[in-house]
Image (spheres, rainbow, N blue to C red):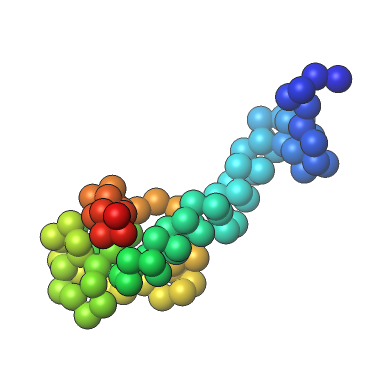
Amino acid sequence: MSDNTPRTYVERLASSSPLAAAAFALNRLGSGSERNVEILALRDRAGLVAVHTTEDFDPHFAEPDADSAICGLAVYRVLNAEQFGRISVLCRNCESAAIARLA
């Protein structure tokens, strides 16, 4: 037995074919992720809200009730809990600014 043998039944199934591997990867994208938890914690610690802007689809951070995100883009809408629960990416500038606030 090698060290890289999949451990769970689902992982073994995913390794059995490219189609099964794609389904496994898609399911992992759709479920809650560690990255989402990190973004949630950063948002809460920095006292910000997650928003969409008018310029792109990536989530951003903004001050509550602000008209623009930390990176300067105009806020289109504040993300609700269900929308926020699906994100695993964040504007790099907004993330860096939020981290800098905590330093």
Q: Is residue 82 visible?
A: yes
29, 93: nearer the viewer: 93
User: Could you tell whether 74 is left or right of 86 in the image?
Assistant: left
Residue projecting furthest to the bottom:
65
Q: Look at the picture and state if 44 lies above or below 23.
A: below
The quarter of the image holding the N terminus is top right
30, 20: nearer the viewer: 30
| Residue shown at the point (49%, 65%) measured from the top left | 85
| Residue shown at the point (20%, 69%) measured from the top left | 75
Point out residue 57 in the picture as x, y percentages from the top left corner: 30, 56
Q: Quadrant of residue 47?
A: bottom left
Q: Look at the picture and state if 34 lies above or below 80.
A: above
User: Could you tell whether 29 is left or right of 83 in the image?
Assistant: right
The quarter of the image holding the C terminus is bottom left
99, 69: nearer the viewer: 99
| Residue shown at the point (22%, 80%) measured from the top left | 65
Point out residue 77 in the picture as x, y percentages from the top left corner: 27, 73
Residue projecting furthest to the front:
103
Q: Quadrant of residue 10?
A: top right
Q: Quadrant of residue 60?
A: bottom left
User: Could you tell whether 47 is left or right of 26 in the image?
Assistant: left
Q: Is residue 57 visible?
A: no
